[in-house]
Image (cartoon, rainbow, N blue to C red):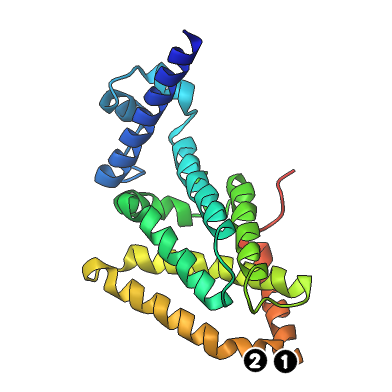
Amino acid sequence: MSQALTLKAEHTRQRIYDTAIRLFKERGYDNTTMREIATEADCSLGLAYKYFESKEDIVVHLYRELAVHVANYIGQLPPAPMSQRFFDTMQEILRTVAPYRGAWVGIFGAAMNPTSPVSVLGDRMFDLRAQMRIALEGLVSGASDAPKLAEQTRALGLLLYVAHLLLLLFWIADRSAENRLTQQMLELARDLFNMLRPAMVMPPIAKGILRVASILEPVFIGEKPA
């Protein structure tokens, strides 16, 4: 009996989540309320709050699903040049988020606002940022052209983390047919990375990468909230 109730609860939670994502897509994140989500999901407001304390929690759930999926995907990638592994990972990320593109557009304003509860760079998202960064460090360390030093792996993982955010931003803004320009940008990024990779072992370039990473980390990762 308890198992049936658990399954029913999971289905209810998923229905509320799916409804919220649809409304974010149709109305925008800021214009959607928990009451509207509950009404559209055919449940009471109290039940909606039982599964999600706020609409911000729904966005966090969306982020978390993506982070877990990306980590699992990278963990299964075969050894290959770093540029190809990143290209393949970005292709998978875009395939994963494509069904929710309208929702991402709807929440993008809030996601980019550093004072918003769902800011991708806010305190609430620190653990998810750290999880994604670790996954991308694994992308670097598992590459056939992985750097030998741990500090270089960490720095490159951070740069790829920033790159993936910028590419997602480009994808959200891309209005070309079938996101043709995003695909071209991914291919360009892969080809430029291939061209630059041999130079990254040169001491001045390697030091420069570490320096850039040290500047970006406080902004794009930050410190774990107390």
The image shows residue 179 at horizontal and vertical percentages of 28, 68
Asked if residue 116 shows in the view, the reply is no
The image shows residue 27 at horizontal and vertical percentages of 26, 43
**Residue lying at 78% horizontally and 75% vertically, measured from the top left:** 149
Q: Quadrant of residue 159?
A: bottom right
**Residue lying at 58% horizontally and 75% vertically, measured from the top left:** 82
Residue 81 falls left or right of residue 187: right
Residue 30 in the image: above or below residue 6: below
Q: Quadrant of residue 135?
A: bottom right
Task: Say which residue label 2 marks.
Answer: 199
Label 2 neighbourhood size at 10 Å, few (<14), some (14-19), many (20+)? Answer: few
**Residue lying at 35% horizontally and 78% vertically, measured from the top left:** 184
Image quarter of the C terminus: top right
**Amino acid type, callout 1:** Met
Residue 220 in the image: above or below residue 224: below
Q: Residue furthest left?
A: 177
Residue 210 falls left or right of residue 41: right
Dot 2: what SS? helix
Which mark is drawn over residue 202? 1
Asked if residue 111 shows in the view, the reply is yes
